Amino acid sequence: MLRVHEIYQSIQGESSFAGVPCIFIRLAGCPLRCTYCDTPQALSATSGRSMSVDQIIEAIAAYPQSLVLVTGGEPLAQPDCIALLEHLIELHHTVQLETSGAFDVSNVPPSVQKVLDVKTPGSGEETRNLWANLALLQGHDEIKFVLTSREDYLWCKAVIEERLPDTPATILLSPAYGQLQASDLCAWMLADNLPARLNMQIHKIIWGADVSGV
Ligand code: SF4
């Protein structure tokens, strides 16, 4: 069984699939408390309702999209998340998993595109980074840094240079909403010719920062 905060269809706002219609499965619960967390409503492991994998599959059958995002909270905090991912792959969905980087991703099915956070000092959760995860990433995976300041950017640049020189994954840099100007981040990326992509949260541009479930 899994604790599910919400299931809905929308436009994927981030990653290489930004702008693509998508089914969102938001699992409940996360042991981290990032300063910039934009899903505080899903942090409690008791939010939402309990559903079996089959019930979740039945619920998403109401939507026509092929792309499915499993997110949270922290999806991998629930062991049955792996069974859910496997079932979605068997049904030929294109599957993305958003994870904090604090949980081992070695059991995630290889066909799933992992979007793995690296927690910056500004997140307040830097010590939760499970660095061994970086070596498990494939070419279709993505590594996301959410940056709150110039200090976070310089820290991120050092991580990219020291830990990720040969990563096959795409590196995404996101300005923390309301904390860092995207224009400043773009200027720093260009000045350093950083091998990374700007990652904007377009759902916040479309519907506003405080709207959930859209
Ligand atoms: S890992 Fe994600 S869901 Fe958990 S506190 Fe951080 S931003 Fe929020």
Image (cartoon, rainbow, N blue to C red):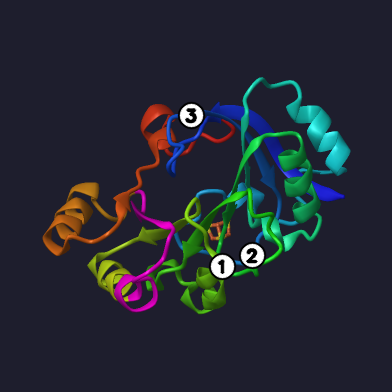
Tell me the tag on residue 20.
3
Q: Is residue 121 above or below residue 179?
A: below
Q: Which quarter of the figure has residue 149?
A: bottom left
Q: Is residue 103 above or below residue 173?
A: below
Which of the two discs, 3 and 2, labels the residue nearer the N terminus? 3
| Disc 1 C-beta below 8 A from ligand 1 | no
Q: Is residue 166 magenta?
A: yes
Residue holding disc 2: 105
Q: Amino acid at mark 2?
A: Val
From mark 3 to mark 2, how far is it between C-alphas? 25 Å
Q: Nearer the viewer, mark 2 or mark 1?
A: 1
Q: Nearer the viewer, mark 1 or mark 3?
A: 1
Is mark 2 in CB contact (under 8 Å) with mark 1? Answer: yes
The magenta span reads 159-177
Q: Viewed as shown, does residue 184 lie left or right of 89?
A: left
**Residue 51: percent from the left, percent from the top?**
85, 42
Residue holding disc 1: 136
Quarter of the rendering occupied by the C terminus: top right
Q: Nearer the viewer, residue 36 or 15?
A: 15
Image-quarter location of ligand 1: bottom right
| Disc 3 C-beta below 8 A from ligand 1 | no
Which of the two discs, 1 and 3, labels the residue nearer the N terminus? 3
Q: Which quarter of the figure has residue 202?
A: top left
- Residue at 35% of width from left, 43% of height from top? 200
Tell me the tag on residue 198.
none
**Residue 63: percent from the left, percent from the top?**
68, 22
- Element at label 2: loop
- Element at label 3: loop
Q: Is residue 141 above or below residue 61?
A: below
Q: Amino acid at mark 1?
A: Leu
From mark 1 to mark 3, how far is it between C-alphas? 26 Å
Q: Amino acid at mark 3?
A: Val
